[in-house]
Image (cartoon, rainbow, N blue to C red):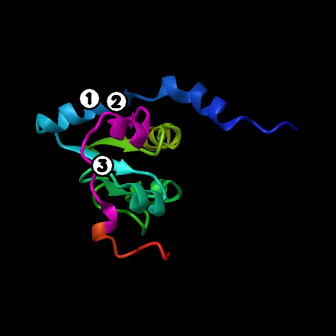
Amino acid sequence: MTIRNTMGWVDSLRDRVPTMDAAGLQARRDQGEALTVIDLRELQERLDKGAIPESHHVPRGMLEFWADPAMGYHRDFFTEDAEYVVYCAGGGRSVLAALAMIEMGYTKVWHLDEGFAGWTKADLPVEDAAATARWQRKR
C-alpha cells in the first residue's frame, strides 16, 4: 500500500472550504465584524511565535470535541450562529479543520490562507501569547 501524500490530499480539499487571506481578515476586524478566530497550532507554536490577537487556542486534535455542544469538552465560544476563521502555521491543518466544522453543521467558516505565516508576512499585529500563558517552555 502506498501512503497518501498529505499535502496533496489537503490541496485536493481546498476548493471545498471558503478561504480568507490575512488582509481580508484584518479588514473585516477593522470594520468591527465579530469573527471568532481559532488558532489550531500546537501550544508550543503559539508560545514560541505568538498569535493573531484575540484568537482562541484550540489544538487541532480537540477541535471537534470542543466545538460539539453535546460534549463535556465544549467551549462556549463555539456557537451555531458565530462566524469563524481557523488558522494554523501555513494553511494545511486549517483546511482540514474548516472542513470538519462545516461537516459538523457550522455554516460560516473560513480557513486563513497561508496561515500564521501569511499573517506575519503581511506585517499584521502579533500577540505575545507566552506573556500571558501559564505554560512555558523549559530551557
Q: What label does residue 24 carry, if any? A: 1
Residue extending farthest top: 15
Q: Give coordinates of residue 41: x percent, y percent.
A: 46, 53
Q: Position of residue 105 (x, y in %)?
A: 41, 41
Q: Is residue 101 left or right of residue 38?
A: right
Q: The residue tagged with tag 2: helix, strand or loop?
A: strand
Asked whether the residues under the numbered discs 2 and 3 touch, taking CB atoms below 8 Å apart as contact, a structural biologist would say no
Residue 107 seen from this side: no
Please tell me the numbered disc located at residue 52. Answer: 3
Q: Nearer the viewer, mark 2 or mark 3?
A: 3
Identify residue type, mark 3: Ile
Which residue does the image show at 38% across and 63% down from the upper left?
74
Looking at numbered disc 1 in the image, what kind of residue is underneath it?
Answer: Gly
Residue drawn 28% across the image and 56% down it: 77
| Image coordinates for residue 134, horizontal then vertical, percent | 35, 76
Magenta highlight range: 107-130
70 and 59: which is toward the camera? 59
Q: Which residue is mark 2?
A: 20
Tell me the residue at 42%/60% (across/down): 48
Q: Nearer the viewer, residue 108 or 22?
A: 22
Residue 123 magenta: yes
Label 3 element class:
loop
Report if the CB atoms under discs 2 and 1 are less than 8 Å apart.
yes
Assess whether residue 121 is covered by the magenta stretch: yes
- Mark closest to the chain's N terminus, 2 or 3: 2
